[in-house]
Image: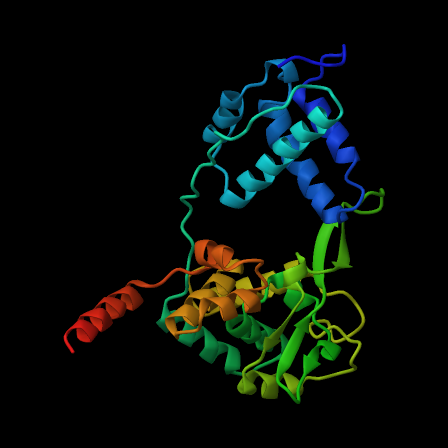
Amino acid sequence: MKLFKQKNYILKDIIKMWLETKKDIKIQSVQKYEFLISHYLNNHIGNIYIKNLKEKDITNFFNNLNLSTSTQKTLFYIIKSSLKFAFKNKYCDYFELNEIKLKKNTNTIYILPKETQIKLELILKDKINIRKSCLLLCLYTGLRIGEVCGLKWEDIDFNNKLLRVKRTIQRIKNTDAYSKTILIESTPKSETSNRVIPIPDFIAEILEKFKTDDADYILSKSKKLYDPRQFEAFYERLLKNNNINYFNFHSIRHTFATRSIESKMDIKTLSEILGHSSIDITLKLYVHPSHEFKKSSIENLVNFMSL
């Protein structure tokens, strides 16, 4: 590559300039980019001069790090967007990235065994309170932790047994000197994350018993934001106190998706309930059929062909 301008930029300078142009994105997205840039890109390929950067440098960068698929995709977006920015501003010639192959994520996704889910549901229904109710809601709707913490009573339509996802609660880095982090309310993760989800009748009946003012957050029982970390801590104590093996909160969302497919829900419906932009995302990331389901599916095929 050759530079159109005399100054020889290194990659991290280009990335910094690109990020400064991103004025229309959420602050939590900016902070996510800043974290990934400082922890990964700057430390590994950030000091390479743009004129010397080659596809193999980027390929080696991804191959040498054990990162989740999501993190890899975000890092690749940053690199690709920054290089497009550099070309547009004539800092370099056009840079091809057609041969970059991201590593497949080999991390095991944990899905609750059906018997464990049944045990957990029995525990949640015993001496039920609002936090247990909301955990039960997540098991049957696949809500993200920030989304359930952001629910207000006004978002629940008890007549039609529906809930509307309009907001999410997140803890982000604080920019002032008073505290390291701060809770914020923001719009959902994406446009399709703003959605309407049916609620099972039995959960709607449970929730209605705890209803307070329409403008109250359900979990805080007030106008005060409810911290997702507080809800996660409650959830982890619940598992520990009832001798259930630990699985992270997001596993509930994976479990909901898998149980939905096992119960014959069509993939398009599931994708919309989860708030995905395409069914491909749902299939690749959130559907993990159990061994029992695979076995029964094969048996069903055999029975069908035997008719």
Residue at position x 72%, y 23% from top?
13
Report whether residue 49 is seen.
no
Vertical comparison of 35 with 277: above or below = above
Residue at position x 63%, y 80% from top?
162
Vertical comparison of 176 with 59: above or below = below
User: Which quadrant of the view contains residue 47?
Assistant: top right
Quadrant assignment for the C terminus: bottom left
Image check: 225 left or right of 278?
Answer: right
The answer to which of 129 and 95 lies nearer the viewer is 95
Residue 304: give x, y in percent of width and height. Answer: 21, 74
Residue 169: give x, y in percent of width and height. Answer: 71, 60
Residue at position x 59%, y 36% from top?
75
Residue at position x 54%, y 19% from top?
54
The answer to which of 116 and 13 lies nearer the viewer is 13
The answer to which of 158 and 175 lies nearer the viewer is 158
Quadrant assignment for the N terminus: top right
The mark tally for this picture is 0
Image check: 192 left or right of 117?
Answer: right
Vertical comparison of 262 with 174: above or below = below
Vertical comparison of 145 with 139: above or below = above
Residue 167: give x, y in percent of width and height. Answer: 72, 64
Residue 228: give x, y in percent of width and height. Answer: 66, 61
User: Which quadrant of the view contains residue 145?
Assistant: bottom right
Image check: 140 left or right of 51?
Answer: left
Give the colouring mode of the picture.
rainbow
User: Which quadrant of the view contains residue 184?
Assistant: bottom right
Report whether residue 252 is seen.
yes
Image check: 284 left or right of 179?
Answer: left
